[in-house]
Image (cartoon, coloured by chain):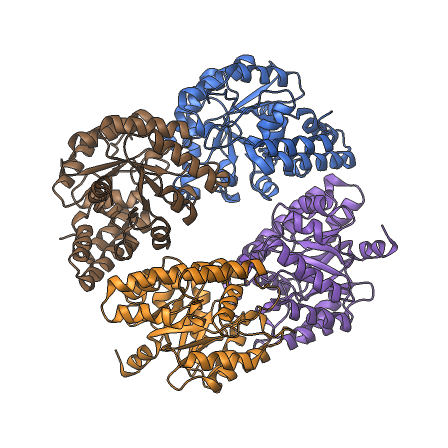
Chain colours: A orange, B purple, C blue, D brown
Amino acid sequence: MSKEQTIHREKLSGVFAPITTPFDENGEISFQGLEENIKKLNSSRLRGYLVLGTNGEFKSLSESERRKVLETVIKVSGKDKVVMAGTGRESTKESIAATKEAASIGTHFASLIAPSFFAKKMTDPVLLNHFRVIADASSIPVLLYNNPEVVVVTYSTGLIGEVSKHPNIVGMKDTSKGNFASYLLAAGPDFNLLAGSAAFFLEALVMGGVGGVLSIANFAPEACCKVYDLWKAGKLEEARKEQYKLMTLNQKVSGKFGVAGVKAAMDFAGFYGGSPRAPLLSLTADEKKKLKEDLLNSGFLKK
Amino acid sequence: MSKEQTIHREKLSGVFAPITTPFDENGEISFQGLEENIKKLNSSRLRGYLVLGTNGEFKSLSESERRKVLETVIKVSGKDKVVMAGTGRESTKESIAATKEAASIGTHFASLIAPSFFAKKMTDPVLLNHFRVIADASSIPVLLYNNPEVVVVTYSTGLIGEVSKHPNIVGMKDTSKGNFASYLLAAGPDFNLLAGSAAFFLEALVMGGVGGVLSIANFAPEACCKVYDLWKAGKLEEARKEQYKLMTLNQKVSGKFGVAGVKAAMDFAGFYGGSPRAPLLSLTADEKKKLKEDLLNSGFLKK
Amino acid sequence: MSKEQTIHREKLSGVFAPITTPFDENGEISFQGLEENIKKLNSSRLRGYLVLGTNGEFKSLSESERRKVLETVIKVSGKDKVVMAGTGRESTKESIAATKEAASIGTHFASLIAPSFFAKKMTDPVLLNHFRVIADASSIPVLLYNNPEVVVVTYSTGLIGEVSKHPNIVGMKDTSKGNFASYLLAAGPDFNLLAGSAAFFLEALVMGGVGGVLSIANFAPEACCKVYDLWKAGKLEEARKEQYKLMTLNQKVSGKFGVAGVKAAMDFAGFYGGSPRAPLLSLTADEKKKLKEDLLNSGFLKK
Amino acid sequence: MSKEQTIHREKLSGVFAPITTPFDENGEISFQGLEENIKKLNSSRLRGYLVLGTNGEFKSLSESERRKVLETVIKVSGKDKVVMAGTGRESTKESIAATKEAASIGTHFASLIAPSFFAKKMTDPVLLNHFRVIADASSIPVLLYNNPEVVVVTYSTGLIGEVSKHPNIVGMKDTSKGNFASYLLAAGPDFNLLAGSAAFFLEALVMGGVGGVLSIANFAPEACCKVYDLWKAGKLEEARKEQYKLMTLNQKVSGKFGVAGVKAAMDFAGFYGGSPRAPLLSLTADEKKKLKEDLLNSGFLKK
């Protein structure tokens, strides 16, 4: 590993929270709420934040809103925290513009989701060209983001093998099911692969992943860091126990309800959760009640 | 049918071209090319234009580009032509804003594609609420746009049955496979349903559809209008023959190559086609040569 | 068309019922029930029967049961009726054996569903080879059966174009959504294409299909024949009205409940319906009550 | 754990080979080839065999062939080896009959694949009823088999939670992608879960799985056992290295070519591989040459 690679690895190792975007009663972004959330998370052992990702509802924000959200997070983010930002757009042109803007604001890593509107045309050569051109144009290192649930496209292992050779594409957040080790095998161990879901965080670490971007880290950062720390300390048996607790939590919140569930749990845990932006709906009163019970029973919330 | 409904029906009956957005060598929009294309199409028997749809690569345009494209089309569009514009966005809020803007420019109908980033959450109640809120806020009548290939979501017949009761949701462009008659059955005969693909244009008309939004109308408007006119004249046997020709053309262009194919064929036919915006790629030289041969052999292009 | 082709066309033109297999209270086949059903249907204007298809639950029968079911139908089938039998199996070897057996019993046409257990390996060359070898070995003409809902595999238009050149593959029953006209375009007008669902029966006829194999013909043969006859008589407007009635009926029975629904409706209509074989379950008492109401309200059942 | 449960666990812990069915040049089963394969594998550290599974092409065999294959394996199987047999059929009735027959022959565990022809009707209650009825009727313990690639159906975690409460359903072979830990969480640690693919064998063990049924164990039993043994010995780092070798091997053989690839590799490794039964095709000469090179380069085959 080169010195630069070692620095990237260090920055990407650990747990990241994919920051939600808080909205007020009128559906406008609450920047104050966002600031408060980040300040609270600053005191956790989280390695950093992913801004403008799926949980950030970035597709429901205008470009100017996206910029302000990112500026806000960078402004209040702790000095020890690493900030990634989602800068993938449907066109290569706009992806480059968003990546450059994020870099100019002080983002550490750009995270590129696949264009998906023309999913059938997103063949390996098309995606390879798209990512290369952006990475060439970017002054900050680039990560791919693989999430077939929201963009249909699943990266092939061949694509990841090719992409990993680019000096400015330094890793990937993988949210797909059951492909993590295959990507590592294709890309080689120097590629920084992060689990994009708590559902397989420990397996990812065991196979050579460097960390995770976990939606439940928005409200349960310590539970996530615990799995990571136990793994690092070689305590596999205990790590597994905590991993199963994490999975249970994840299923009841993100798995069942998505962003709206994460926001409801944030409200319970003292963060500013609030409602997602329409068309996404908040949990109903009954769903919230049930979720609260689940969180109390699982020992995550204290009475 | 009310008087208003009769007016809508008249405006929506016939063939529409889903206008492509021409780009110059630098990847910037060629507004001159766009004007020329519309002026040429003005002299055809097309009923009108759909701007900012899938073939318009609207997801690859910025909001300000979208506005300018729409303004340009409306400026040069023939007085007898009807203009629809794609105004669906990922959030309800932005969809309303885009719809209002389109109305203020002079668009006749807004066309709403489904939000799809959170496709799994796009249940019938969520979509119903989304479309109703936009239709309530819109001063111009609204059409839905159903295209599972680009947005994953397929509207249920139950949703269409409900949506069709809204006085300001007056029809739908259906590009899905094999659902057209089911939607008409669910919505009733006063709902204006248009075929979103040449692949089933005649079947759609036979079952009660009022027209079609056909990608190949961008370069072959007369071939499309011929099917419509023969059907209207009660000449079913001849209409079928022409429909099969249309299908052949459609398969070789849109079916095989998508927007890039439509643009290549436009170049052959004397329109400004040009390249799609990256990540979409132009046809290779070999593909263009083969396409030209296909168009010559099918009798569509004259030597 | 050759003389032989003309004979095939005549035999395949019209409405076929995909015969259900009746079971008694112990889950054993009721051959008496089967005989009675066929005798009743003999007096209808149906062109014939498809035995051992999806509605016949052929995958839930042993090979010896399949033989007996086919023998029974052929024994009591009216002289004017045409009998097709499902003889596709997972291996080419067993498909050939089943086809030969069916021929030896007196079946007129063999219907070949695709092998699907190794669906990912069922490429065009593999399927082409499979169907050719069977057709070569068969003394009776062969039809393909295309039903992606039960076998995952959807035939490509390229495959159908190739297959249609084989002198002993004379047509196809297509149950897939939205591909009918494409198959006809690929195979040419001499290929005998039958709609495999009432959902698009009229469209299929309009585009050049010769008939339909319609599950609801098991209990509503006349309603199905009415659409066919009106179409043949050139009464398109009336045919469309009847087609929409047929679609409504089909949605409430087959669409909603599958084979179990068809069997319940058969019971209401005076046929021997009974229960499907486990794991399929009968309709619950509530579902039956609701179905009966639906059939009464639609005017299909008389009080 | 009860005494009986402890015995089951012991029998199911380790690596199993899903035995292929060898065919001679005429496409008939070579029972001599099968005997020789089993005798060779008897000397390996494999825990046992799964007969009549996906790799056994059981769907391409007649019922009488299935019986003979199972009898042959049981006859020559080593005394220390555990034999599972695939006894799931499309109907509950035939699944019970096959399970009873397998038990009467001396099979230790029955393996039940889901019925899939009516996949859309295979809801949780339907599957729960199906599996319970078979398990009730079976004198030998039953395992489920989860393989969405061949049967479309993916078991829900809710179903597995319920099924695991049945005293005679003692485990599952899971070939699905990315669900293994979720199933263990739903079923509890006493449920015997086996990885159904080498692609995630080590992750499965780490999360609490007891073993694996691995197609490549047909020709590389020691490579598979090595991962298992290293894991058991607490040598995680070394186990991971071997797991990645296993994955590479698996991708080049099963992943790329399926059963035909496994059989070709068996031929290279001194077993009786031969051709799959049509419609499956053998590897072409070029594919075989390439595969041989891959196996030599990976160090698996010695020159």
Res. C10 in view: no
- Residue C227 lies in quadrant: top right
Residue D168 visible in this rendered orientation of the protein = yes
Q: On the image, which quarter does residue D109 sit in? A: top left
Please state which of residues B262 and A236 is positioned toward the viewer in this rendering: A236
Report the side of D50 relative to D42 (left or right).
Answer: right
Q: Residue furthest right?
A: B3
Q: Percent x, y for residue A51?
A: 48, 76
Query: Could you tell me which residue is drawn at 19 percent across and 48 percent down?
Result: D220
Q: Residue furthest left?
A: D43
At which x and y percent is residue A139? 42, 84
Whether B126 is drawn above or below C240: the answer is below
- Image quadrant holding the C terminus of chain A, namely bottom left
Expressed as whole percent of the image width and height from the top left, the position of residue D84 reads 26, 37
Residue nearest the viewer, comparing B159 with C242: B159
Q: Quadrant of the N terminus of chain A?
A: bottom left
Q: Position of residue A281 (x, y in %)?
A: 59, 63
Please state which of residues D16 and A88 is positioned toward the viewer in this rendering.
Answer: D16
- The number of numbered badges drawn on the structure is 0
* Residue extending furthest toward the front: A303
> Relative to A199, is A213 above or below?
below
Please name whichever residue, B81 or A276, is drawn nearer the observer in this view of the structure: A276
Q: Would residue C155 appear left or right of D169 to someone viewing this image?
A: right
